[in-house]
Structure formats: C-alpha cells, structure tokens
Amino acid sequence: GENVEQHPSTLSVQEGDSAVIKCTYSDSASNYFPWYKQELGKRPQLIIDIRSNVGEKKDQRIAVTLNKTAKHFSLHITETQPEDSAVYFCAASNYGGATNKLIFGTGTLLAVQP
Amino acid sequence: DAGVIQSPRHEVTEMGQEVTLRCKPISGHNSLFWYRQTMMRGLELLIYFNNNVPIDDSGMPEDRFSAKMPNASFSTLKIQPSEPRDSAVYFCASSPVVAGAYEQYFGPGTRLTVT
C-alpha cells in the first residue's frame, strides 16, 4: 500500500542554523505534498505544500523541494528560531484520484537550541 | 469561522465503557477525517467521509470502532467497548476539497484515557 518514510526522527540544531527534513513516498500517482507543524499539545497545522507540477516552493524562511523521479521531497527551514521547535509531518496524496486521503510520515521532532 | 470543533476535549473512562467523540467540521467543507495519534504509532487515519458518505474505513482498528456522519455539520466516532490501548489523542479534520484547495484543517483533538 501507500507509504511515506520520513527522516530524521529527531533533529537538534543551533538557533540560526538550517534544518532539513526528508521524505520519500511509494505511490507514483501522488501529486500533493503538504507539511504540517505540530507544537506540543496542539493540533497539526499546515505550513507549506507543493503540487507535483512544480519542483520548489518558498515561503519566507521555509521551502519545500520535490523530486518526482526519485519520489522524495524535503522541507528546508533557514535561520531557525526557538519557536520553530515542534514536530513536523510530511504527507502525500493523490488528489483527483480514487481517494483524497493524506498518507503521513512518522514525524520529525525538531529542537532549536537558543 | 470557529474552525473544526471537537468535544469533549478530554475524556477519562473505564475499560468496557462506551465512548463517543464528536466533531463539527468547518461550514462548507465536504470532506471529514478522523485520526488517532499515539507516540508509538504516530498519526493514523481511521476513516474519512466525502459528502457525508464513508469512503475509506480501512484504518479503523477493529469492530469496536464505528463512525457516522448523519449530516454535513456533524460526525461521531464511537468506541464500544473501550480498552486501555485505545488511549490516544483523536483528531477530526475537514477539508473543502475543491479545485486547488486541499488543506486539511484539524480540530483541537480529544485526549482519551481508558483506565
């Protein structure tokens, strides 16, 4: 079945450094790749997403890249700040296909050390 | 809009009791999703509805779990009988699923503890 693998499971960086989280997906029909941020005790919230017709998308300090040939996509956070500390989930979906459900990765706990 | 509303926010019950979790999606959203989150298993999709119709319930762990969506503004997830291993945070999410708008908006979650 569909599967999304996410690495690393934990990531610790110094404030101001960059953080990169990587995901691979198994369903070649996937065409929508969102990233969610979940702070401790809170709900997951969408921070950025990318469609399969583009290779990169940027929003201020966060960016996502997509390589459809290799079936992997990555989240890049630059100039990290303590408030970036959270669990980040990647997901993949085949919107417009038989189902619109998201397949989530297992999450990455990002700790930004001040 | 108030966002996705879930109730109760916390539920503590004894093993064997029936538990009912409730969700009100964002008005106008036509897809609704139920997730379970635990440390061990992460974020799991249990079931989702399009236009009040269950589309995929392959994530429902066993017959003790059931979900309904009687109308566009209300859904329930029921566990009967509950077991300690059902302890988790249960999220409901809704999505408009119109062309170009795929984001799922999560509710605050219900923290279920079964003793």
Image: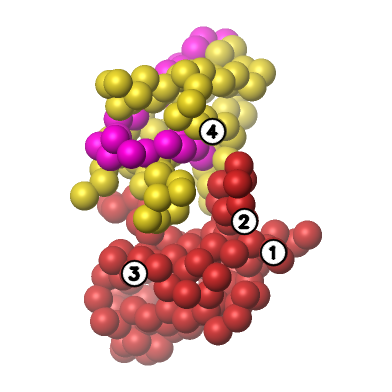
Q: Are marks 1 and 2 in contact (CB under 8 Å)?
A: yes
**Residue pointed to by mark 1:** B28
Secondary structure of the residue carrying tag 3 is loop
Looking at the image, tell me whether mark 1 or mark 2 is earlier in sequence order: 1
Quadrant assignment, res A91: top left
C-alpha distance separating marks 4 and 1: 22 Å
Secondary structure of the residue carrying tag 4 is strand
Report whether mark 1 lies on the same chain as mark 3. Answer: yes
Residue segment shown in magenta: A11-36
**Residue pointed to by mark 4:** A49
The residue type indicated by label 4 comes to Asp
**Residue pointed to by mark 2:** B96
Residue in the image at 54% along x and 33% along y: A49
Q: Mark 2 — on which chain does it sit?
A: B
Q: Position of residue B2 (x, y in %)?
A: 75, 61
Predominant secondary structure, magenta span: strand
Residue neighbourhood size for the residue with mark 2, other residues' Cα within 10 Å, grouped as few (<14), some (14–19), many (≥20): many
**Residue pointed to by mark 3:** B57
Report whether mark 1 lies on the same chain as mark 2. Answer: yes
Q: Mark 1 — on which chain does it sit?
A: B
Secondary structure of the residue carrying tag 1 is loop
Give the number of the disc on residue A39.
Answer: none
The residue type indicated by label 2 comes to Pro
C-alpha distance separating marks 2 and 3: 20 Å
The residue type indicated by label 3 comes to Asp
Residue in the image at 59% along x and 64% along y: B30
